Amino acid sequence: MKKYQIFSLITGTLLVMGVATGCKSGGKGPEGRLNWITEKVTDKLDLDKDQENKLRDLVKTVQEQRKAHLDQSKSQHDELKAMILSEKLDKEAARKLMENRQAAMREGFDPVFEKLQVFHASLRPEQKKEAVELMEKFGKRFH
């Protein structure tokens, strides 16, 4: 599977979570939003306890990845600000910044995708259909 397709699959899953929330914050910060999204997805897809546990395990992995890369993101943000404030943009510095960001995303992909596969495999066909309907609804709002 191509990297773009895999990234799209993960993004789609997170979008489903976002759709189920109605794009409300549900709490302070990203962790509060993820917890609120988890509750909404559990409700909308009518997950059983085993499926809910697999979803929570997926969300926990996403949260761990986010925390692991938080310092790097702050550093990259500072570098980006410095680049914007400079007289001239440095293409090589921008490329390096982008490559570092992509490397961090690739590094965190496997653990998240493994949990996503486990959760996906636990869904019944009607739940997958509902997830697609939620994704389509979300897409209409923002495209």
Image (cartoon, rainbow, N blue to C red):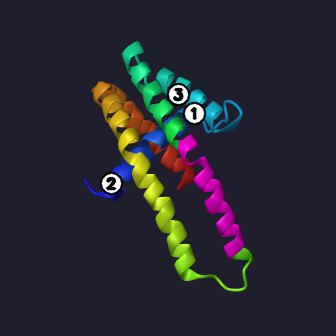
> Residue 28 at what x, y percent from top left?
71, 33
For the stretch drawn in magenta, the main secondary structure is: helix
* Mark number, residue 34: 1
Disc 3 versus disc 1: distance between alpha carbons?
6 Å
> Residue 43 at what x, y percent from top left?
50, 21
Disc 2 versus disc 3: distance between alpha carbons?
24 Å
Residue at figure coordinates x 51%, y 71% from the top left? 96
Inspect the image, locate mark 3, and give the three-letter code of the amino acid beneath it. Answer: Thr
Residue 125 is a magenta residue: no
Disc 1 versus disc 2: distance between alpha carbons?
23 Å
Identify the element where label 3 is drawn: helix
Can you say whether 1 is above or below 97 in the image?
A: above
Circles 3 and 1, Cβ within 8 Å, touching? The answer is yes
Report which quarter residue 26 is drawn in: top right
* Mark number, residue 38: 3
Which residue range is magenta in the image? Answer: 66-83
Residue 33 shows in this picture? yes
* Mark number, residue 5: 2
Q: Earlier in the sequence, mark 1 or mark 2?
A: 2
Inspect the image, locate mark 2, and give the three-letter code of the amino acid beneath it. Answer: Gln
Inspect the image, locate mark 1, and give the three-letter code of the amino acid beneath it. Answer: Leu
